[in-house]
Amino acid sequence: MTPRQLPLDLGHRPAMGRDDFLVAQCNSDAVAWIDLWPEWPGPALAIFGPAGCGKTHLASVWRARSGAAIIDAARLAERDVPRLADGAVVLEDADRGVDERALFHLYNMIAERRRHMLLTSRSAPARWTVALADLRSRLNAVPAVSIAAPDDSLIGAVIVKLFADRQLRVGDEVVQFLVTRIERSFAAVRAAVAAIDAASLARRGNITVPLVRQVLQDQAAKETEG
């Protein structure tokens, strides 16, 4: 029996620059708003969409341009507000467990100091459950732009990009096979590429359609068992 190599998770650095972001119909409005900065009409912008759709990538692009600090909304505390409001700030997952009073004060201080804040979330601010009325009125005034589900051409381009991030090149037949069989989300594409990479390392083989078929079948079986 040929011994199987254990894949070592050495990590990889996704390309996160502006030129690496794949622009398509589903995300072009969000890209246009990022490119519009610093000429935003107000102190804040919200970008919303499903997990893995590119919100964090766009936030990283804006962070590089603006020098923004970045913080998970669940970790925002009132003591952090004066420091964060000294410059631009990205508040990620802003619809998931944020301290409303801290966000209210941050918004006000950002506006007073003529700074800017980018909010990322899975739904538009107008749909968030917000108890603090003053915060709700401010969020309702924030321009909100969505990133929609990707089409086949974008899914294919993302597959190629994610393999390239891992210094891997795959044939067109592999890309097309994945496009026609994978869930329409970037999160699913990312998980599949990681699993395929690990499987190819374990088998010391090339990435082929039979290998990809087996990986997808294994993933489906695990989901069924779960």
Image (cartoon, rainbow, N blue to C red):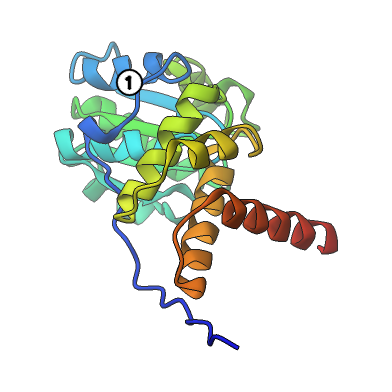
Residue 94 seen from this side: no
Q: Is residue 82 above or below residue 135?
A: below
> In the rendering, at what x and y percent does residue 65 appear?
15, 33
Q: Between 172 and 124, which is closer to the camera in this rendering?
A: 172
> In the rendering, at what x and y percent does residue 134 appear?
51, 25
Residue 40 seen from this side: yes
Q: Which residue is at 58% across, 20% downward?
A: 126
Q: Is residue 22 left or right of residue 158?
A: left
> In the rendering, at what x and y percent does residue 36 appear?
23, 15
Q: Between 110 and 221, which is closer to the camera in this rendering?
A: 221
> In the rendering, at what x and y percent does residue 173 appear?
50, 37
At label 1, which amino acid type do we have? Val
Q: Is residue 40 left or right of residue 77?
A: left
Q: Between 147 and 70, which is closer to the camera in this rendering?
A: 147
Identify the element where label 1 is drawn: helix
Q: What residue does disc 1 label?
A: 31
Q: Which residue is at 56% across, 51% downward?
A: 192
